[in-house]
Amino acid sequence: QKEVEQDPGPLSVPEGAIVSLNCTYSNSAFQYFMWYRQYSRKGPELLMYTYSSGNKEDGRFTAQVDKSSKYISLFIRDSQPSDSATYLCAVLSGSARQLTFGSGTQLTVLP
Amino acid sequence: DTEVTQTPKHLVMGMTNKKSLKCEQHMGHRAMYWYKQKAKKPPELMFVYSYEKLSINESVPSRFSPECPNSSLLNLHLHALQPEDSALYLCASSHLAGGLSGSYEQYFGPGTRLTVT
């Protein structure tokens, strides 16, 4: 079983839609969770960082962690064509704070 | 400032060449990372430096040789690479002890796109 599993997509939505991106993880000891956005041929950009359970909101983005079900989600409200990218969930582990990524979900927001 | 810089942006090298990738950060981070990313795949961890010492080597072939000259710089020396080593090479950095905010956010550079011919 992979440590982090991500809904693979691809996902295509109309502009203005609410987008839900989801991952599950296997190790209940994980406490730090991140979402990255990666545009084509660029480096990953940190979008959201969450510790333990709960919600975190930043503008149109909300990250949610449910530790009881080992489920992490990213919601994008009022999606824009500029949100078209690959979204990667990641969990942090180990003394060296290394990241393990999900496989990524490619999102296209159609104007 | 959360910037990690990488040079060069693009690199084409033959299988007999020796080249180096460079990475720099000025966020006071004491953990620095090299990742390799193939097309349509997530980044895969290669090496981790903690306090300028190599702490993790994910069984990377010896044709990749990392170096951390100081707390701000990270190099990846390349020698006798194979065409299958063509990929986007990403550098990242983070706090090790949680920083002032107690966080471990990991920031990535833009990457070096490497093509081995």
Image (cartoon, coloured by chain):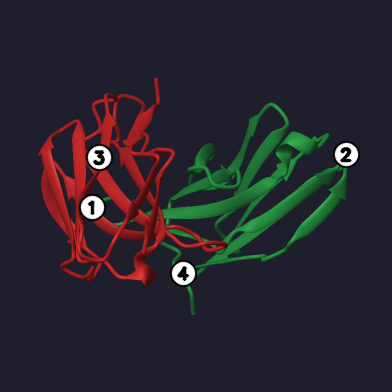
From the image, state whether disc 2 or disc 3 is nearer to you. 3
SS of the residue under disc 1: strand
Chain rendered red: B
Chain A, chosen colour in render: green
User: Looking at this view, is B74 or B33 the one in front?
Assistant: B74
Foreground: disc 1 or disc 3: 3
For label 2, the residue is: A15
- Whether residues under marks 1 and 3 lie with C-beta atoms below 8 angstroms apart, the answer is no
Q: Is residue B68 left or right of residue A5?
A: left
| Residue B16 visible in the current orientation | yes
- Residue B53, percent from left and from top: 10, 48
First-in-chain label (1 vs 3): 3
Q: Which residue is mark 3?
A: B22
Give the chain letter at badge 1. Answer: B
Give x and y (percent) for residue B15: 26, 66
| Mark 4 residue crowding within 10 angstroms, few (<14) / some (14–19) / many (20+) | some
Q: CA distance from mark 2 to mark 3?
A: 39 Å
In terms of secondary structure, where does tag 3 sit? strand
- Mark 4–mark 1 CB contact (< 8 Å): no
Name the one closer to the observer, B87 or B52: B87
Q: Mark 2 vs mark 4: which is more N-terminal?
A: 4
Q: Residue at x 34, y 42 (%)?
A: B92
Residue type, numbered disc 1: Val
- Check chain identity for marks 2 and 3: say if they share one: no
Can residue A95 be seen from the camera position used here?
A: no
Can you name the residue that lies furthest to the bottom here? A1
Q: CA distance from mark 1 to mark 3?
A: 15 Å
- Identify the residue under disc 1: B48
Q: Quadrant of residue A94?
A: bottom left
Specify the amino acid type for callout 4: Glu
The reply to whether callout 1 and callout 2 are in contact (CB within 8 Å) is no
Q: CA distance from mark 2 to mark 4?
A: 33 Å
